[in-house]
Image: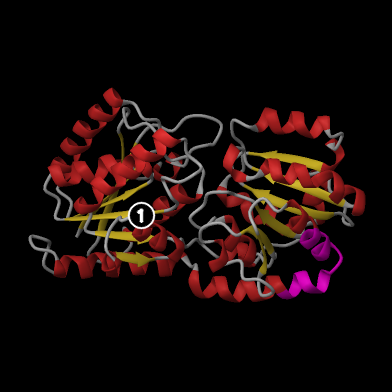
Amino acid sequence: MRVTHVITRLIIGGAQENTVDSVLGLRQQAGLSARLICGPTAGPEGSLESSFAKIPEVLTLVPPLVRAIHPWKDYRALIQLTRLLRAQAPDVVHTHSGKAGILGRLAARRARVPIVVHTIHGPSFGTFQSGPVNQILRAAERYAAPRTTHFVTVAEAMTSQYLAAGIGRPEQFTCIRSGFALESFLKAKNDPCFRKRLGLAQTDFVVGKIARLIKLKGHSDLLAAAPLLVQRCPRIKFLLVGDGPWQKRLKKHVRALRLEDSFVFAGLVAPSEIPRYLGVMDVLVHLSRREGLARALPQALAAGRPVLSYDCDGAKEICIPDKTGFLIRAGDIGQFTERLLQLANAPELREKLGRRGQTLVQEWFSVERMVEQLGLLYKKLARETPRALSL
């Protein structure tokens, strides 16, 4: 069975890491071959294109496939995708992200690909978008839905949201958790030398946040809470991992608050280095206003670190109150502050929450489980879909 995945860009991010792991993992399964098509990757958010350095034939770039809405480039991308899929003649096209999800599915149908799967990593429409953009994206998703054989969601919350928006039918959805290689996270240690290199003392209470530095990731809420947190817990330090267009804005805000000594901007970090950073964190916070299920949450739990998250999209499926961490009502800075101070003063509670989180993540989030479930889904769809490959 030949499978072609399509994604808009390969920046360092959860959806992109999921896609790369899926393609590489599927290539190891008997009877399956997998390829990837994506648009150009540029900017401060890094690139995962090097993942295919040893097998360059697996990755094909389509220059006009860009993230922003651009009618002329979008039309050219649709034409190029259709030609590529006709040439590759896959049995399954599996799309990811908003732009590639729409154009990839349309191109797959134009190329007469029998099975078209789309993964919903996070909502592509909602109140976080401007009114006109939200309407366009919602309409595009509804238009693409009848051209989709099956939807994969990374959280049950995504299934509920899309069905509520009139997109797809219940039997078209399967939740497959976004798995990752667990071993290095399970072995994460609080390395004193690494702490020192980052400017962190052994006695510091380190609050970590792993996210691109963009508007919807909630860094502004963290900064809003920071002055009171530092006042009530002077040993608190904030370790921000990630880069993005908001870097200068956030650093300027920190200087305005005179909290430079309390913040560490680690910048862009390779995925392989994330366990090392989690090892020196005491808790991970996630304050995003839009997220399917943030990869940082199960990664932190795999490292034995409790999580504190806004109740956004699929967060409650992994951040389980009093079991693996605490859920906060989005935008409730007061509740966030109190819960974080509670964790700062209760190392035994942090250890208990992290230990329970490790058990949950090992059961649900291994990359092997994710790849196996994808392979089984493809084979099931092939048996059920007319003109699909007979297995």
Q: Quadrant of the C terminus?
A: bottom left
Left or right of 94 in this view: 188? right
At x 84% / y 43%, what residue is drawn? 262
Q: Can I make out residue 234 in this image?
A: no
At which x and y percent is residue 104? Answer: 26, 43
Main secondary structure found in the magenta portion: helix
Residue drawn at x 81%, y 45% as measured from the top left: 226
Location of the N terminus by quadrant is bottom left
Q: In the rendered picture of this protein, how many numbered marks are placed on residues? A: 1
Q: Which residue is mark 1?
A: 165
Determine whether 123 is above or below 182 in the image: above
Q: Nearer the viewer, residue 87 or 377?
A: 377
Q: Nearer the viewer, residue 305 or 154?
A: 154
How has the structure been colored for display?
secondary structure
**Is residue 197 or residue 139 the one in the foreground?**
139
Q: Is residue 33 left or right of residue 122?
A: left
Q: Amino acid at mark 1?
A: Ala
Q: Secondary structure at mark 1?
A: loop
Indicate the quadrant where residue 306 lies: bottom right
Is residue 132 shown above or below 164?
Answer: above
Residue 16 visible in the snapshot: yes
Q: Position of residue 100 (x, y in %)?
A: 32, 41
Location of residue 113 with respect to 242 vertically, above or below: below
Residue sitting at x 69%, y 40%: 220
Q: Taking 206 as reference, is 175 above or below it? A: below
Magenta residues, start to end: 338-352
Residue in the picture at 63% in, 71% down: 357
List x then y, in percent, for residue 58: 30, 45
Hey, which quadrant is residue 206 in on the image? bottom right
In percent of width and height, residue 233 lies at 90, 54
Q: How many C-alpha atoms fall within 10 Å of the one at disc 1: few (<14), some, or many (≥20)?
A: few
Left/right placement of residue 75 relative to residue 330 reads: left
